[in-house]
Amino acid sequence: MEFYMLDSTLVVALMGEIDHHTCVAIRQAVDRNYQKKRAKNLLFDFEKVTFMDSSGIGMLMGRYRLAAIGGGRIGLYNVPKDIERILKMSNVCKLMKAYSNKQEALKELA
């Protein structure tokens, strides 16, 4: 994973598989960076994600709650079609929007 700040948004570039084996480490790293950098919003880049199961949905929902408590929002971009389908089936897209690119996401999250 890579982390960087753009204004008040922590951008998280995810890589590889997001499943029950990796979710704990992802959650801990995201939470640590979110609090350390005093971010408001979270933006996840899925460009290099190759797989995501229901554990990934749970990880995203937990980060949604974390951001919402602080008045922030979550966005996603570069979401592969198969993962986008999982997000729609689980209704996650009602809580966090999948954007077509980073610029569009940052504009709406600002």
Image (cartoon, rainbow, N blue to C red):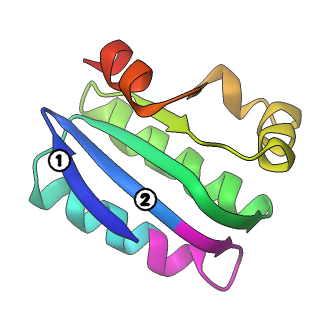
How crowded is the residue under tag 2: few (<14 C-alpha within 10 Å), some, or many (20+)?
some
Q: Point out residue 8 in the picture as x, y percentages from the top left corner.
A: 15, 33
Residue in front for this viewpoint, 73 or 81: 81
Please determine whether, in this image, residue 86 is positioned above or below residue 99.
below
**Quarter of the rendering occupied by the C terminus:** top left
Q: Residue at the location (32% across, 48% down)? A: 11
Q: Tell me where the magenta segment starts and ends, as one range.
A: 15-26
**Is residue 56 toward the left or the right of residue 45 in the image?**
right
At mark 2, the secondary structure is strand
Residue 96: numbered disc? none
Residue 19 picture location, percent across and down = 71, 74
User: What is the three-letter code of the residue carrying label 1?
Assistant: Met
Who is closer to the viewer here, 85 or 27? 85
Under circle 1, the secondary element is: strand
The residue depicted at 41 percent of the width and 33 percent of the height is 102
Circle 1 crowding by C-alpha within 10 Å: few under 14, some 14–19, many from 20:
some
Examine the image and state in which quarter residue 97 appears. Answer: top right
The residue carrying mark 2 is 13
- The quadrant of the picture occupied by the N terminus is bottom left
Question: Residue at point 45% right, 48% down?
Answer: 63
Marks 2 and 1, Cα distance to the nearest angstrom? 11 Å
Image coordinates of residue 77 in percent, x first then y, are: 54, 37
Q: Residue 5 shows which numbered tag?
A: 1
N-terminal label among 2 and 1: 1
In which quarter of the view is residue 104 placed? top left
